Image: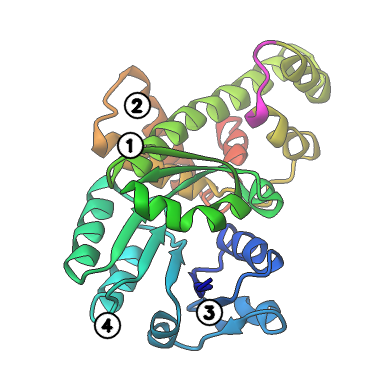
Amino acid sequence: MNVEKIGFIGLGNMGHPMAKNLEKSGFPLGVYNRTPEKADDFKKGSVVYRNLKDLIEKCDIIFTMLTNDQAVKDVYEEIISLNIQGKLFVDMSTVSQEATIETAKAVKIKEASFIDAPVAGSTQPAAEGTLIIMVGGEEKDLQRALPYLQKMGKSVKHLGENGKGIAAKLSINYFLSMIYQGLAETVLLSEKLGIERKDMLEIINESASGSGATKVKTPLLVNNQYEPAFALDLMLKDILLANKAGANYPLSKVLIDTYQSAHNEGFGKDDVIGIINYLKK
């Protein structure tokens, strides 16, 4: 059996634990990150590449987990300048649907394959390998990537052609932005009415209004510490992408105004639920 060599580009807060799960599973893995230090703890179990070109040449299936449209554009411009015939690229970044479809077309012109496979879940599910992975692309390409995706996620959903994975991702993050703003406002209201934050969060989490989203943010709210699992600035980026893609609803303007103002006030690097500190100002 021909064992394919796996590459992973982008070792940020999400990419690092996702790549670690591939490494722990014993796949032949090569990694690259623009900031080399982030790859240091891959040196024992994987190949750490110092440049993109070498990784692309040596790997058969390449995963990318990048910050935004510009980062994806920059990396894939370099990729498509190389001989990539027969390789499969799996972009797990959250970017615009337009950027995804353009990237897919550019890769396919070079006789390579591409699927978009963004994820639902933050750093803890990434570390646990329990992400939900939403896929846009051809079935044969998904099947080729599936053994590796299954090590990073608990659920892999094929939603159609290129661009459909990112469409689902923008939709779920749009909903999450509402949940987090609503949760923050509810906690602030209850405190104003004399209810302890811890008590209110217990009531929320034990009631029908509780969810995985509210539960995962409870420790941050209780401790009033907002180390980013998913930064507020990233949520702002995703709300704006959703708006550009067609989210023009009554809540859209409210969400954009709130998250943009929180960014402007200096809360962008905090975890997204740190929106509470902006709202109580």
User: How many callouts does the rendering have?
Assistant: 4
Residue 149 screen position, x and y as percent: 54, 53
Residue matched to label 3: 35
* Alpha carbon separation for disc pair 1 and 4: 32 Å
Say few, some or many: other residues with alpha carbon within 10 Å of mark 4 (under 14 / 14 to 19 / 20 or more): few
* Alpha carbon separation for disc pair 4 and 2: 41 Å
User: Residue pushed farthest front?
Assistant: 1
Q: In terms of sequence position, does the residue under pointer 1 or pointer 2 come before the other?
A: 1
Look at the numbered discs 1 and 4 and tell me whether their residues touch, using CB distance below 8 Å: no
Helix, strand or loop at mark 3: loop
Which residue is found at the position 58% from the left and 57% from the top? 14
Q: In terms of sequence position, does the residue under pointer 1 or pointer 4 come before the other?
A: 4
Q: Is residue 271 left or right of residue 144?
A: right
Look at the numbered discs 1 and 2 and tell me whether their residues touch, using CB distance below 8 Å: yes
Up/down of 13 relative to 260, above or below: below
Which residue is found at the position 22% from the left and 69% from the top? 111
Which mark, by number, is residue 82? 4
Amino acid under disc 4? Leu
Q: Give the dominant element type of the magenta stretch: helix, strand or loop.
A: loop
Nearer mark to the viewer, of 3 and 2: 3
Nearer mark to the viewer, of 4 and 2: 4
* Alpha carbon separation for disc pair 1 and 3: 29 Å
Residue matched to label 2: 252
Magenta-highlighted residues: 208-213
Amino acid under disc 1? Ala
Nearer mark to the viewer, of 1 and 4: 4
Residue 213 screen position, x and y as percent: 63, 31
Helix, strand or loop at mark 2: helix
Which residue is found at the position 36% from the left and 52% from the top? 140
Nearer mark to the viewer, of 4 and 3: 4
Which mark, by number, is residue 242? 1
